[in-house]
Amino acid sequence: MVFMGYRSESENGFCTSEVGIILPTYGEAQNISRLIDALENLKIDSTILVIDDSSPDGTAEIVRRKQKEYTNVQLITRPSKSGLGTAITDGFKTFLSANYQPKYVITMDADFSHNPQELPKLLSTIRKTRCGIVIGSRYCKGGQISGWPTTRKIISKTANLIAKTLLGLKMYDCTSGYRCYSTEFLRQAIDNLHSHTYEIQIETVRQASLREFEVKETPIFFENRKQGKSKLTWAEIKGYLTYTLKAVTK
């Protein structure tokens, strides 16, 4: 299957389940195999969609091997590093274009900073509340962060404060990438998602607010990656701030 100009690879063609899981990857050869195994061990009705930006470390090759083990693992390879925001929206569009759409879509990091064992908690919350988005929150009561240097904590707290203040968002953690979306919300919002990088987290929350979809939070334990390098750059921080400031004027 060719999607959005990118190459989609699967041993069994694209099919989906109740839950779609999006894993954007770049340079995750040290983590991706273990992560897929951990997600499979949850025993939920899921399709795992890896979107790899031509990682030079062979991440995609590892995913191809996992496809021979698991029929529910899908792979999209993109020609170059194109940003977290576009990876997530490409994932949304892939699931929305499926003949059988998932009821829920999970986004999470592929470096184990988001614990797979907490994924069922996000699903449980969205099933009970029927909201548009459930955010795995590092800052609500019960949420924790481990292993971040002080500078990274300051950046995260500042980004949250700016977004909450300027856009009037009533939540503790509006920048966390560990999320569960209802497909009903995604169908309404997808044409208005244009982020390239980390501002996708704010853009989706803002679209939920504009469309009167409730956003819930559930506490998570966030642990800084132990394998590989962080992907956050100053250019992406600038893009996030630029998006937030522009959104205020719209």
Image (spheres, helix red, strand yellow):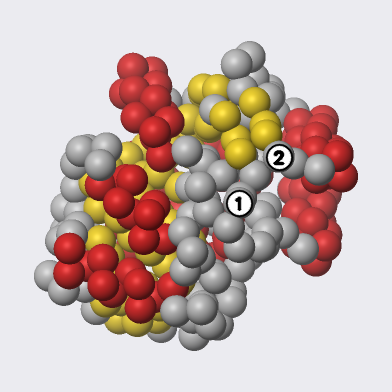
Q: In this view, which residue lies farthest toward the left? A: 12
**Which sits in the foreground, 232 or 174?**
232
The percent coordinates of residue 230 (x first, y second) are: 68, 59
Q: Write the residue at 30% across / 81% down.
A: 2
Q: Is residue 246 visible?
A: no
Instruction: Tell me if residue 155 comes above or below residue 173 in the rendering.
Output: below
Are discs 2 and 1 less than 8 Å apart at CB? yes
Identified at 83% across, 62% down, the residue is 234
From what the image shows, is residue 160 above or below residue 219?
A: below
- Quadrant location, the N terminus: bottom left
Which residue corresponds to mark 2? 147
> What amino acid is labelled 2 in the image?
Gly
Viewer-nearest residue: 181 or 136: 136
Instruction: For label 2, count other residues whose C-alpha is less than 10 Å away and answer few (under 14), some (14-19) or many (20+).
Output: few
Residue 109: image x %, image y %?
52, 51
Residue 10 vs residue 169: left or right?
A: left
Identify which residue is drawn at 42% across, 61% down.
32
Q: Amino acid at mark 1?
A: Lys
Where is residue 100? Give x, y as percent: 16, 53
The residue located at (60%, 16%) in the rendering is: 142
- Mark before the other along the chain sequence, 2 or 1: 2
- Label 1 packing within 10 angstroms: few (<14), some (14-19), many (20+): few
Circle count:
2
Q: For numbered disc 1, what is the local secondary structure?
A: loop
Residue bearing the label numbered 1 = 226
The answer to whether residue 233 is visible is yes
Tell me how far mark 2 sits from mark 1, CA to CA. 9 Å
Instruction: Give the percent coordinates (x, y) of residue 103.
Output: 26, 40
Q: Nearer the viewer, residue 71 or 149?
A: 149
Badge 2 element = loop
